[in-house]
Image (cartoon, rainbow, N blue to C red):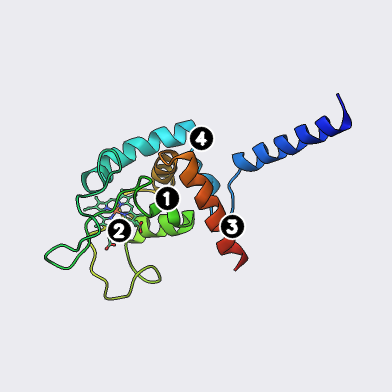
Amino acid sequence: MTARSLAALALAAGLAGCDAGPGPGEDARANPRDASNAALGAKVYAQNCAACHGVKLEGQPDWRKRLANGRLPAPPHDDSGHTWHHRDDVLFAITKRGLVPPYAPSDYQSDMPAFGGVLSDEGIWAVLAYIKGQWSAQARQIRAEMLAGARRR
Ligand code: HEC
């Protein structure tokens, strides 16, 4: 094996290692590759989130259009929504506390419940691990680049 192919191997291994760990804006507790955590998250999702965000994470119909009461329907958590645009800690905070400042104005009216009194922190990280595991490789790649850019700013 030549020195060059060894270097190429080392580079590939380095990149693979990078892919396995939490990138910028990611939290190890929401690691979709942790199979038992993601499996727990799937249960948490089915019991607590699917009724609004959809059994297949598809969201509610016409989710971009406000309801008669002025509130927004539940957005998808799959590639077609914008959940994947946000950092893991932001998703955690919204799930735990609902859409309150700094993620929404203080008088913001939303149907998204705060799960802090219902789910443990571990349960919330697990459901995020499950949701992240449903994103396509392409969405994960774009997200990684977006979050890396956000960190540099
Ligand atoms: C009663 C319906 C309902 C349930 C149950 C519910 N949500 Fe939501 N969720 C919403 C609505 C509606 C929104 C959009 C709120 C808004 O923008 O005003 C939302 C928004 C969110 C967002 C922000 C998404 C984004 O792209 O900005 C996250 C994250 C989220 N929900 C996570 C969860 C998780 C995780 C669960 C289960 C533990 C859950 N939700 C259960 C209704 C619900």
Q: Which mark is residue 121?
A: 1
Q: CA distance from mark 2 to mark 1?
A: 12 Å
Q: Which residue is mark 4?
A: 34
Left or right: residue 150 versus residue 110 is right
**Which numbered disc, 3 or 1, marks the residue that appears first in the sequence?**
1
Per the model, the C-alpha gap separating discs 4 and 1 is 16 Å
Query: Dividing the picture into quarters, in which one does residue 51 lie?
Result: top left
Question: Residue placed at 11% from the left, 65% from the top?
Answer: 68
Q: Earlier in the sequence, mark 3 or mark 2?
A: 2
Kindly identify the amino acid type of the residue bearing the numbered disc 4.
Asp
**Three-letter code, disc 2:** Ala
Q: Earlier in the sequence, mark 4 or mark 1?
A: 4
Residue closest to the far right: 3
Q: Residues within 10 Å of mark 2 (few under 14, many from 20)?
A: some
Mark 3 to mark 2 CA distance (whole Å) = 28 Å
Q: In the rendered image, which residue does mark 2 sit on?
A: 114
What element does badge 3 sit on? helix
Separation of residues labelled 3 and 4 (CA atoms):
22 Å
Identify the residue under disc 3.
148
Please tell me whether mark 4 sits on a helix, a strand or a loop: loop
Question: How many angstroms separate mark 3 from mark 1 (CA)?
Answer: 25 Å
Q: Is mark 1 within 8 Å of ligand 1?
A: no
